[in-house]
Image (spheres, rainbow, N blue to C red):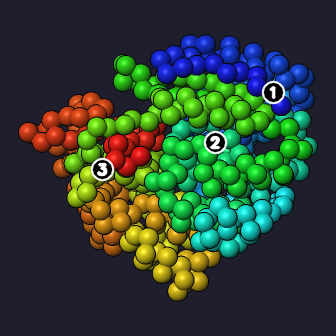
Amino acid sequence: MSLYCAQGGPEADLTPHLKELFTEALSKLGRRSKVLAVPPDQSREHSRAGILTRYAWDYYGDHLKAVLPAIGTHVPMQPAQIETMFHGVPLDLFHAHNWRTDIETLGEIPAEYIQEQSEGKLNYSWPAQVNRLISQGGFDLILSIGQVVPHEVIGMANYTKNILIGTGGREGINRSHYLGAVYGMERIMGRAQNPVRNVLNLAGERFLRHLPIVYAHTVVGRAANGGFAVRGLFIGDDVECFERAAELSLKVNFEMLDEPIRKAVVYLEPAEFHSTWIGNKAVYRTRMALADDAELIILAPGVRTFGEDMGIDALIRKYGYRGTPATLEAVERHPDLAADLSAAAHLIHASSEGRFKITWCPAMLSRAEVEGVGYGYGDLQAMLQRYDPQRLQHGYNTVDGEQIFFIANPGLGLWAHRSRF
């Protein structure tokens, strides 16, 4: 077990040195002739995974044989998105992951373990599934690239999640997401150890050890100039690189507030967020900071759908964001939702449970569609005029005498007030 790079700190900015540090770590791996890179998609553009993948191409050249974006249930990347995020990496190297058809099951975590981790709420086994390119591709290096940041399903993103969920299959994704939902998002977010992480890491120990996986984790934070800075880079082949990155991420990406927020305004960059499935990070990451009866306003100029595929989109439209009791009842009563537990988990995660108001302001969904799934609706242009993202600063602002808390990108942080964490 090896740690090839462990650099950074809460105030560090590794951005100017990123290529040097990354290349130095790759040089420690020895000669590799058939390399697969597994980065995230454009919804994690700030992770710097795009430029790290380019650096891998610069270093390995023709020995980098394939790039498999770890999209999980997301829509496959389009050529223009690939060119923007992975500029300079040949387009013909990229493979689209299909979570329904492209997978192999390597083994199972028994139902007894899931029952223990879920505190008796669930009684099913968990299949460790990966894209066949990973399990059968014959690579002598699988470079798993991504960002460690607070996450709603697994507490802290990355490490085994990037492989077992990002390139995972329908049942593995569904059952892991549902485990997180029934255990409770607010008991998981920002915590490196939790039931979902325990399941995935156990599966990694049992079923991934024969694969030549090396994990490259960034920690990215906001810079003083309003941009973003790489605060840490951790590269290794076991859990230590993840644990060290998670420790730093908690210092960089977690914001503890002394008082709960009465009104939050979150802006979703259109290049990153085109569905509520992804855009509801605005709900996940702020919920522990919002006061009872608070309002969360989501400005979403790029959002045009609910789900990332037609099947999940239809389920969201049918059952809506109605809260945990209604969703659990729907799972019991309706086979279509019971067959897609990741959709059910998402409906739980993205509900306010009636505690605060969520107002969505999308560019390409109508009032009837938004209100039909249980959210409030706001006119995007009117809200953008009132809450101009170009003029607001991160954190507290006063707009026409009203105090609001503004967040420019919810994917980079986690917010809570002390009574809820």
Q: Disc 3 marks which residue?
A: 290
Distance of label 2 from label 3 (alpha carbons) = 26 Å
| Quadrant of residue 323 within the rendered picture | bottom left
Q: Disc 1 marks which residue?
A: 2
Residue at image x 60%, y 66%? 119
Distance of label 2 from label 1 (alpha carbons) = 18 Å
Mark 3 secondary-structure assignment = strand
Which amino acid type corresponds to the residue marked 1 in the rendered image? Answer: Ser
Residue at image x 43%, y 52%? 284
Residue at image x 57%, y 32%? 247
Report whether 280 appears left or right of 95.
Answer: left
- Which mark is nearer the camera, 2 or 3? 3
Q: Which of 365 and 215 is in front in this view?
A: 215
Which amino acid type corresponds to the residue marked 3 in the rendered image? Answer: Leu
Q: Disc 2 marks which residue?
A: 158
Query: Could you tell me if residue 50 is visible in this image?
Result: no
The answer to whether marks 2 and 3 mark residues whose Cβ atoms lie closer than 8 Å is no
